[in-house]
Image: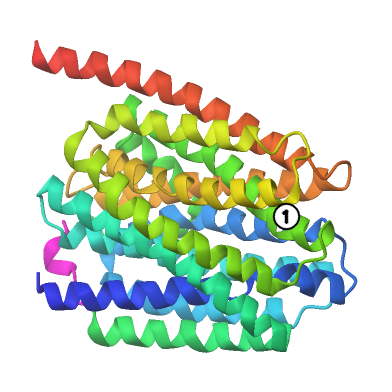
Amino acid sequence: MDRKKFLLFFIIAFIFNMAASFAHPVTPTLIVERNLDSSMFGVALAAMMTMYFLFSPLWGRLCGYLPTKKILMICCVGYAAGQIIFGLAHSEASVVGGRMFAGIFAGGVYTAMANYVVNLSGTDGGNRGQNLVILTTIQSVGSACGFFTGGMLGIISVETAFLSQVGVLLMCGLLWTVFCTDDTPYKAKPDTALRIQDVNPFSAILSAKQFMTPLLALVCVITAVSAIGQNSYEQCFNYYIKDQYGMTSAYNGIFKAVIALLTLFLNSTVSLYLQRKTDINQTFLYILVTCCVLISLVLFDPPQFLFIAVYIVYSSVMVLRLPLLQMMAAAQSDSSTSNAVMGFYQSMNSLGGIFGALFAGLIYARGAQLPFILAFAAFVLSACAGFLYRKEYRKTASGQTD
């Protein structure tokens, strides 16, 4: 694989992840300015994540039949169209409809990016792991930078942030088409032609039984449950600082810029250390436990400065789990199943996002602290599943050694 073209892929991925976050810091403002129900901050994202969940396995399977760069182009165009609907929305129904349409294609982009990296990294597990860490770092730092940029654009107007987002998304689809390598020679060709039933998202999900293992099942459980915690905390925080503290989108953007710097530092030090010097199948658990401890600090109505500081540190630490879980999932696949496995992994991440965002939105009106309690409970449960995974992994590794 030409390293220069891999570098171009990562640069475009960074720009895409920036654009994908332009609308997030202005969404609370959109809800308030257009007199929409406060639950929309969670319900709308849950609608989008539902489409992620349903269609990510389908996009994963399609990556086996089509060049991944074509999937990226199609999904960027669809994502942009969905955001146009969302940005023009003046009712709860149109907000949900726009987010659902965007979600069909947004999940495809993230699935395709992971598949592209896995396919072109070859069979070297170390090389694949390093590239997945780079991709996850790019996603996290790009998202944080996008929050900052979107927050600044939101000072002009909500519409400015959405128009900028749509333009950059379309540009990324075009750039990927022009500069990405056709990964067809690097992946196993499916034995059968694409059938009508393969287009059914539920069929794609049910096909997981063909590659599922006990360890992969536990990885998916950890991924889904921790995603509940992540999205409950994230979505509530964004709305909370607007609703409770009266902070503008600019503050949200500034917080994300700080998170971007801290994330870049932790991923280039702690994440690479865990990958190279430890067995990530065991040390990933430390990340989940740390998240539990951090979230516990905001459960008892702390001072504003502590509330914000904990969020910044937690957001940076939480990101460390993503490349580790991706690598653990990828390790349970081979060349013939990697596309499907990564699609299913992305789907589980989305499934957790559905419940995290939805419940956060619905319970916020009953108590502003309740979504944070939900996030804490979710990370405690994911840590418990992590202990089960480590126990099963040690048993499996011991059996292989014997």
State the scheme by which the image is colored: rainbow
At a point 62% along the width and 61% down the height, the residue shown is: 48
Tell me if residue 217 can be seen.
Answer: no
Q: Is residue 208 above or below residue 109?
A: above
Residue 204 in picture, x, y percent from top left: 42, 49
Residue 228: image quadrant is top right
Residue 362 in picture, x, y percent from top left: 81, 47
Looking at numbered disc 1 in the image, what kind of residue is underneath it?
Gly
**As drawn, is 13 to the left or to the right of 124?**
right
Q: Give the class, few, some or many, for how many residues have Cα within 10 Å of label 1's Cα (few <14, many ≥20).
A: many
Residues 156 and 196: in front is 156
Tell me if residue 355 can be seen.
Answer: yes
Examine the structure image and report whether residue 184 is included in the region drawn in magenta.
yes
In this picture, which residue range is highlighted in magenta?
181-189
Residue 111: image quadrant is bottom left
- Residue identified by numbered label 1: 42
**As drawn, is 394 to the left or to the right of 294?**
left
Residues 74 and 88: in front is 88
At a point 65% along the width and 47% down the height, the residue shown is: 233
Quarter that holds the N terminus? bottom left
Q: Secondary structure at mark 1?
A: helix
Q: Majority secondary structure of the magenta segment?
A: loop
Residue 247: image quadrant is bottom right
**As drawn, is 138 to the left or to the right of 181?**
right
